[in-house]
Amino acid sequence: MAMPALPGIPERTLWTVADLEQLPDDGNRYEILHGELLVTPLPSTGHQGLAARLLVSLAIWCRAHTGWRFLTPGGVYVSETTWLEPDIAIYPSPEYLNLTWREMPAPVLVVEVLSPSTRKRDRHRKRPAYLTFGVGEVWLVDEDARTIERWTAASEFPETFHGSITWSPSAALPPLVVTEAELFGPKP
């Protein structure tokens, strides 16, 4: 499906990562999924605040455990026709810091904060693409429902967390626990 013409954006029926590299830095998020251009406007302040609160918890955990890194913003290069930009990505090793995005392995955790304009895309299109690529877990964070859905490649349905979520990429490491209150704030 071709993306409708946007000002300053050429029409194409198949987009590649090389095409993305030619797009303007205009505040929009540009991704491609199986050759289709996905354009997302600048996230809302609520979306960014939620992503930042979760990032702080994940960053503190990563700093406490040698060999783990978070990256945001950044991209997940799947192929020349699939480039996705999660809200947060966690990687298992510091030696990846000097690689290009195309050389990076699949993250062990990807987080997408759901927005009204991207909810369906994040849940039904990007999530399966991440998991097919080898991402260990995908979290879909829903501020309205105050939940986190955890998906893995083996999931037919997600695990849905309401009060807190526990994450541990390795049995040898202590888990990270993120509570509903620290992520979403007090209940209204």
Image (spheres, rainbow, N blue to C red):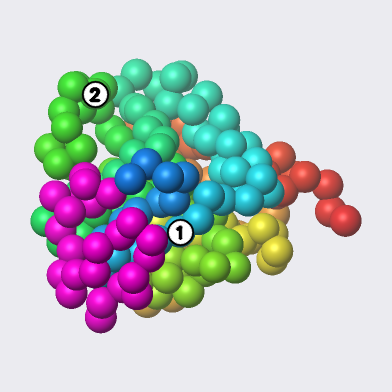
The residue under the point 50% across, 55% down is 41
Labels 2 & 1 near each other (Cβ < 8 A)? no
Q: Residue at x 34, y 27 (%)?
A: 68
Q: Is residue 46 left or right of residue 132?
A: right
**Which image quarter: residue 182?**
top right
Give residue 97's mark.
2
2 vs 92: above or below: below
Q: Earlier in the sequence, mark 2 or mark 1?
A: 1
In the rendered structure, the answer to whether residue 141 lies left or right of residue 22 reads: right
Q: Between residues 94 and 66, which one lies in front from this camera angle? A: 94
> From the viewer's perspective, is residue 83 above or below residue 88?
below
Q: Which residues are magenta?
A: 1-23
**Could you tell me the amino acid type at mark 2?**
Leu
Q: Circle 1 is placed at which residue position?
A: 40
Which secondary structure is most common in the magenta stretch? loop
Q: Is residue 131 visible?
A: no
Q: Position of residue 104 (x, y in %)?
A: 18, 38
19 inside magenta stretch:
yes
Relative to 48, 89 lies left or right: left
Rendered view: 112 above or below 107: below
CA distance separating discs 2 and 1:
27 Å
The amino acid type of the residue labelled 1 equals Thr
